Amino acid sequence: MTDDIQVWVKVAAFIGGGMAMGFGAIGAAIGEGYTAAKANEAIARSPQISGDLFKTMLLGQAIAETASIFALIIAMLLLFADFSNVSTLTISIFLSSGLCMGLGAIGSGIGSGLPTGEACTGIVRQPGMKNRITTIMLAGSAIAQSPAIFALVTSLILLFVDFTGRPVSPTWAAIIGAGFASGLGAIGSGIGEGLVAKSGCEGIARQPLAATRTTNVMLLGMAVTETTAIYGLLIACILIFKSFPAAESIASSMALLGAGLCMGIGAIGPGIGEGFTAQSAVKWISRSESSTAQLTRSMLVGQAVAESTGIYALVISLVLIFVI
Amino acid sequence: MAIEGTHIVQAAAFLGAGLSMGLGAIGPGVGEGLAAAKACEAIGKNPVEAGLLTRTMLVGQAVSESTGIYALVIALLLLFVV
């Protein structure tokens, strides 16, 4: 019987590793492709500063690449995991860890590529503002990476927390649910934050005098967009660290799996929507100084309303975990 | 451990509730974000009408919120009533 479990643990580790790297490659490739396309466009417009543009492109692509490097690390950890001391729960741990990192890298990969593309266009428009634009680009891309870092943290916690002594049912479902919550929950925020940072770079290049207020509102908008990814991380941590009593019924397992899926999928829409809102607000704040206060207020109100469905998903997840 | 029919039905209700609210949150989230984005654009172009634009934005968002609330209602029905 022990051999049997080892076989299935290996199957889970290899499928998990494949999913981690397979899903994890999607986002970074799209983001870096967008960056390269914008860089080519920019070099065609001003070939005389092609050296600067090439450097900016590579710098931005390196940041966008991090998301898929995280996925590579988790895939490697899964492929070369220790298969000598395993239990039934290890099967779901390996599957969930791979899924979590793979899905979590999609949004940040796409999101981190967006500001760099816009930075290349901006440097062509205002070569004198090169340093300022690059700084904002780096800050924006780095913040857009944070949802992927949440997914990495969840994957590593899953791999290294000791689950011995926990009942197989329903803990297996809590583990898979945690992977979905953190992994899927990172997609929306990653893309949304990338959109905000993109319009931050554009705004500073168009209106260099508005750099300070544009940066402030950009950071505020990104922070609000981040919240849904934090909900995903929160639900994942609850699912991992709360010890659930043994239950024979399949219903309690499905409640925990449903909680993870609910929060993960439910975080995608609000994350992207809040990103759209802040993107537009940042764009117009850079152009019209007089309406900064009104635009910031409208942005926050709009984001709060878009957040509401994410909060519904959080409530349903918490009900599934604590009430049912 | 015999799997009983009532357990399977209950399991499906829980999973269905999670999927309902999760998938149901995507559309309103993106849609309300777009509405607010366009409102910000309009306020940027015409700050004098900020009050009117914010009101219109909120009404539009409330309408697109409705499908999210349907998903919430169905999820709660699946959890507590059915």
Image: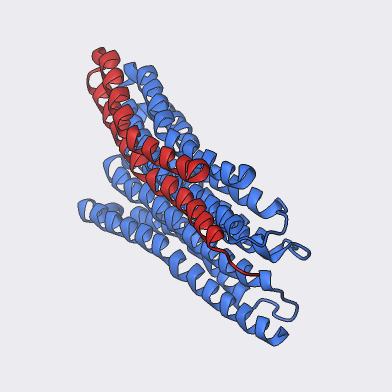
Chain colours: A blue, B red
Give whichever of A129, A136 is nearer the camera: A136
| Residue A57 seen in this snapshot | yes
x 39%, y 55%: residue:
A110
> How far across and how far down the image is residue A244, in percent?
70, 54
Q: In this picture, is B68 found above or below A64?
A: above
Give how far across and how far down residue A239 sits, in percent.
64, 52
Classify residue A221 as left or right of residue A169. left
Image height of B39 relative to B18, above or below: above
Q: Residue at x 57, y 51 (%)?
A: A150
Please report the residue visible at 52 percent of the width from the left and 50 percent of the height from the top. A147
Badge count: 0
Q: Quadrant of the N terminus of chain A?
A: bottom right
Q: Considering depth in this image, is A1 or B27 the residue closer to the camera?
A: A1
Residue nearest the viewer, comparing A181 with A58: A181
Q: Quadrant of residue A7?
A: bottom right
A142 sits to left or right of A29: right
Choose top left, top right, bottom left or bottom right for residue B6.
bottom right
Q: Position of residue A214 (x, y in %)?
A: 40, 30
Q: Quadrant of residue B44?
A: top left
Q: Residue at x 72, y 76 (%)?
A: A86
